[in-house]
Image: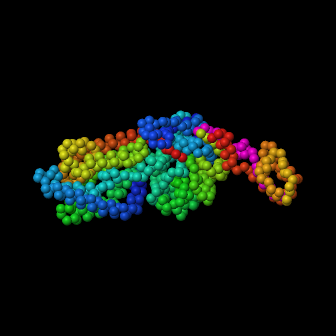
């Protein structure tokens, strides 16, 4: 469905240091640096997948999305999406995709949301019958009923974002690119958006590529993640694999009756200790969690135990460190 | 075609939301119209030679100018398009399965049409019933009127084609102010909006007649008053068409070339 083959893109960025003198100098001569935004990016995405596209700020996520939606022309490499080259057959191609840029807006500011939808219906030439059906589904799943008749400028960010997503789906695209769709949303709106993405993926088989900084989005939605940093592809695979490879630590919190003897167990480190409470970090490559609990219960009189996996956020931070990005 | 019709519809809806703006516009245009007429009246009273355009024709010229301001003013701009370009929201426009030139042309046309539709009636209506010599007069005959409508609409299309270059230039400069000023001042002057072209010195008239701007305003208004003969008006329609086709072609070419280089910055 989507196939990228060694895509590269670099930007020329004008540079100058601060100060009046430097600014004057820049009037006559400007220094440029070449920034490699994307370097040899290749991946394939199959129909019906939800792929999380992650990486730190400035990694090249949005650039990739822009190339895939035909807005940017890469310097080199091949890209074939549904048989189209996005930047070459732009008009033909974009009928099949929906794009949400979380930081931008496609709705007409001054008129009720529904008017923008009607215009999009005509732009994409959607038959009235089909439009009605899609609209009903969108209104229901994204809870737009109360806001669809208000002008866009009166909507809150979360409400607007739900409308933006709906607007990108009026024409029933087969591929949906979401560039930070949950940016700035509260917990309730985030969950609504996630739920919705899941629904259209399952019911309509829409292929979704989403970039985000919220790892909960990825955990809730994507079974596959692609990680890029400084323009290079670093990891492409299942989220579980990532967790197995990098998330080898678990945390045990134990409460027990007052006890002063040491609870030092090989393969664990004590993060916190009081006579009645301890927090241990386990390296699961050295010792099984069940063994730790057995050893603990031999040493102390346990009252309560909680086991936590390493949060995905931590894994990502660790990953970024490991790849030095 | 359907797309263009619904852009127009949406524009009209937006226009109607701002009723007080329309009313204020009408008031300003009346004020401006009176001032211009009075200034010219004063000049005409003390002139020694016979002016190249009669006061009656001139007054009609000025009222038409005020009524169809949205059709003829280059500074009458769509800030939304400028914002699209400078803020990067153009990313969305590029994801639409439409030809961008046509889509924007429709948007601009719709904006001018909706604005003029809301404002021209009250001005024209009142201008007809004003006391002499300030009143507007009917065209000499029906054919002249038909010719006027044709030339006015062609003029509108021509103006939109010219203004497209303004928007295209923003892709390069990223700020609309410079192009607006240059296009606005030169365009308005050579369209005869500051001094009607027949009142310009001969050498300046020659320049104005070569440039496309006068075909948007000066020409249709003088066709209306009968100052331009019908036979000349028909020739003029063909010149308008020629300019229109040429500018459309150039504009499309220019837009496609800037789009190739466009980079939507930021996340």
- What residue is at 28 percent from the left and 44 percent from the top? B212
Q: Is residue B94 visible?
A: yes
Q: Please say whether residue A47 is one of the residues in the magenta stretch.
A: no
Closer to the camera in the image, A220 or A36: A36
Q: Is residue B147 visible?
A: no
Magenta residues span A231-256
Q: Quadrant of the C terminus of chain A?
A: top right
- What residue is at 42 percent from the left and 52 percent from the top? B80
Closer to the camera in the image, A108 or B80: B80
- Left or right relative to A257: residue A151: left
Q: Quadrant of the N terminus of chain A?
A: top right
In the rendered view, how is the structure colored? rainbow
Name the spot of residue A256 as percent of width and height, x first: 83, 58
- What residue is at 30 percent from the left and 63 percent from the top? B27
Name the spot of residue B181 as percent of width and height, x first: 34, 48
- What residue is at 55 percent from the left and 37 percent from the top? A36
Q: How many marks?
A: 0
Q: Residue furthest left?
A: B48
Q: Please say whether residue A240 is one of the residues in the magenta stretch.
A: yes
- Left or right relative to A108: residue A208: right
Closer to the camera in the image, B45 or A187: B45
- Left or right relative to A206: residue B143: left
Name the spot of residue B213 as percent of width and height, x first: 28, 46
Name the spot of residue A267 as percent of width and height, x first: 81, 45
Q: Residue furthest right?
A: A298
Taking B59 as reference, is A281 above or below it? Answer: above
């Amino acid at each position: 469905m989507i196939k990228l083959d060694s895509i590269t893109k670099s930007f020329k960025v004008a540079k100058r240091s601060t100060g009046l003198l430097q600014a004057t100098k820049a009037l006559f001569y400007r220094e440029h640096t070449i920034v490699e935004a994307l370097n040899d990016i290749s991946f394939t995405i199959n129909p019906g997948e939800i792929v999380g596209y992650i990486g730190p700020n400035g990694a090249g996520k949005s650039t990739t999305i822009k190339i895939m939606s035909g807005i940017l022309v890469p310097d080199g490499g091949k890209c074939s999406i549904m048989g189209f080259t996005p930047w070459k057959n732009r008009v033909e191609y974009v009928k099949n995709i929906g794009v949400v840029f979380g930081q931008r807006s496609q709705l007409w500011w001054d008129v009720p949301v529904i008017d923008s939808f009607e215009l999009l219906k005509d732009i994409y030439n959607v038959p009235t019958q089909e439009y009605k059906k899609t609209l009903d589904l969108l209104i229901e799943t994204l809870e737009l009923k109360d806001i669809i008749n208000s002008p866009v400028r009166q909507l809150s960010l979360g409400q607007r974002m739900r409308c933006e997503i709906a607007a990108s789906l009026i024409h029933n695209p087969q591929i949906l690119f979401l560039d930070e769709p949950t940016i700035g949303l509260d917990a309730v709106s985030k969950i609504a958006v996630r739920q919705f993405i899941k629904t259209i993926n399952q019911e309509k088989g829409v292929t979704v590529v989403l970039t985000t900084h919220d790892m909960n989005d990825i955990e809730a939605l994507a079974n596959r993640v692609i990680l890029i940093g400084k323009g290079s592809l670093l990891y492409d695979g299942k989220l579980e694999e990532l967790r197995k490879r990098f998330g080898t630590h678990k945390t045990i919190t134990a409460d027990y009756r007052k006890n002063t003897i040491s609870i030092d167990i090989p393969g664990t480190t004590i993060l916190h200790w009081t006579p009645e409470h301890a927090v241990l970090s386990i390296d699961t490559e050295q010792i099984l969690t069940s063994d730790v609990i057995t050893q603990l219960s031999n040493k102390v009189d346990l009252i309560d135990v909680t086991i936590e996996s390493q949060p995905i956020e931590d894994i990502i931070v660790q990953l970024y460190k490991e790849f030095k990005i | 075609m359907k797309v263009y019709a619904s852009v127009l519809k949406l524009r009209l809806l937006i226009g109607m939301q701002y009723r007080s703006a329309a009313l204020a516009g009408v008031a300003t245009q009346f004020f401006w119209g009176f001032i211009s007429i009075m200034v010219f009246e004063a000049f005409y009273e003390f002139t020694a030679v016979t002016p190249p355009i009669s006061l009656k024709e001139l007054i009609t010229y000025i009222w038409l100018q005020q009524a169809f301001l949205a059709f003829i003013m280059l500074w009458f701009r769509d800030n939304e398009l400028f914002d699209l370009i400078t803020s990067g929201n153009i990313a969305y426009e590029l994801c639409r399965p439409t030809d961008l030139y046509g889509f924007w042309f429709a948007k601009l046309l719709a904006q001018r049409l909706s604005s003029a539709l809301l404002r021209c009636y009250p001005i024209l209506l009142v201008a007809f019933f004003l006391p002499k010599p300030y009143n507007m007069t009917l065209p000499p005959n029906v054919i002249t009127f038909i010719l006027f409508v044709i030339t006015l609409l062609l003029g509108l299309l021509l103006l939109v084609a010219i203004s497209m270059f303004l928007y295209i230039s923003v892709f390069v400069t990223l700020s609309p102010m410079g192009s607006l000023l240059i296009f606005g001042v030169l365009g308005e002057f050579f369209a005869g909006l500051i001094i009607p072209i027949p009142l310009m010195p001969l050498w300046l008239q020659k320049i104005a007649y070569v440039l496309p701007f006068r075909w948007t305003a000066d020409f249709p208004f003088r066709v209306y008053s009968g100052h331009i003969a019908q036979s000349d008006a028909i020739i003029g329609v063909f010149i308008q068409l020629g300019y229109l086709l040429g500018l459309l072609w150039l504009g499309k070419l220019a837009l496609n070339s800037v789009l190739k280089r466009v980079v939507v910055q930021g996340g």
